[in-house]
Image: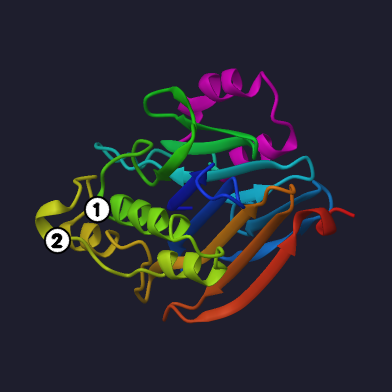
Amino acid sequence: MCILFIAIDQHPDYPVIICANRDEFHQRPTKSMHLWQQKNILAGKDLQAGGSWLGLSPEQNFAALTNYRKLPLSEEPKKSRGELVLKALEGVTDNLPKQLEKSAAQYHGYNLIYGSLEQLYCYDSINNKHHQLTKGIHSICNGALDDIWPKMSEGEQLLKNTVNSNKPLSIDSLFEIMANNKQALPELLPDTGLTKEWEQMLSAIFIVSPSYGTRTTTIITKDVHNNIDVYDRSYAPSGDVIKQQDFNLKAVFT
């Protein structure tokens, strides 16, 4: 998972709106969102390492992961960060924050968004800090929570415009935000240790290239009646939709 936009108490009908893109190498084997029978979670699966990038539990717990790019970039082999999503979904307890802090050095840098949809937190393993996601619009990418990278501020503004439009919420409009392939001006690119070419390509919310790009978009909404719906699209390297699925959380787990 490489970018998320989260609106908390910003829409009169939907107190929680989550929009997320997962960016990854196209060659990495993946199974799209589905019910994991053994673990009883709804999530996509990384078939190479066995973990996930985003998922939900029947108790309405949520977890999602983004990698944290920070100089110097390390090639030291470490544990797969995708297992952290599974750990968070298997039981979000008061002990989880301490567990994350103690195990942070076992993984390359990451942000983990976790908790119930009633109260979400973001753990930043680089700075070893937990942040409560308060009322407002938040963005999480490959740096600190609510950083000011161009695509983060762009997506926040687009989501703000959508939820403040005084129109019924359109799921298609949320997908349009996540399909925005506008790249940042070169002088506004962050410096995360990659080449300028890669920084430029990664500066869009939606990334298209033959080898690496946006593989999945997931939209999650929770309405005032506690209905939780999940909309999931998978993409080809061309950026074309190759699979679309809709889930109602209650129906999935009954």
Residue 13 percent location from the top left of the image: 61, 52
Judge whether residue 137 is colored magenta.
no
The residue identified by callout 1 is 150
The residue identified by callout 2 is 185
Neighbour tally class for label 1: few under 14, some 14-19, many 20 plus, Cα within 10 Å: some
Q: Residue 212: name its quadrant.
A: bottom left
The answer to whether 67 is drawn above or below residue 130 in the figure is below
Mark closest to the chain's N terminus, 2 or 1: 1
Q: Which mark is residue 18?
A: none
Q: Extreme left residue here?
A: 187
Question: Is residue 212 at least partly visible in the picture?
Answer: yes
Judge whether residue 96 is colored magenta.
yes
For numbered disc 1, what is the local secondary structure?
A: helix
Q: Extreme right residue here?
A: 254
Question: Front-most of 123 and 161?
Answer: 161
The answer to whether 228 is drawn above or below residue 97 in the figure is below
Residue 79 percent location from the top left of the image: 54, 38
The magenta span reads: 82-108
Hey, what amino acid is under mark 1?
Answer: Pro
The answer to whether 179 is drawn above or below residue 36 in the figure is below
Residue 161 percent location from the top left of the image: 38, 58
Question: Is residue 28 at least partly visible in the picture?
Answer: no
Contact between labelled residues 1 and 2, with CB atoms less than 8 Å apart: yes
For residue 96, side relative to residue 156 (left or right):
right
- The residue depicted at 26 percent of the width and 65 percent of the height is 201
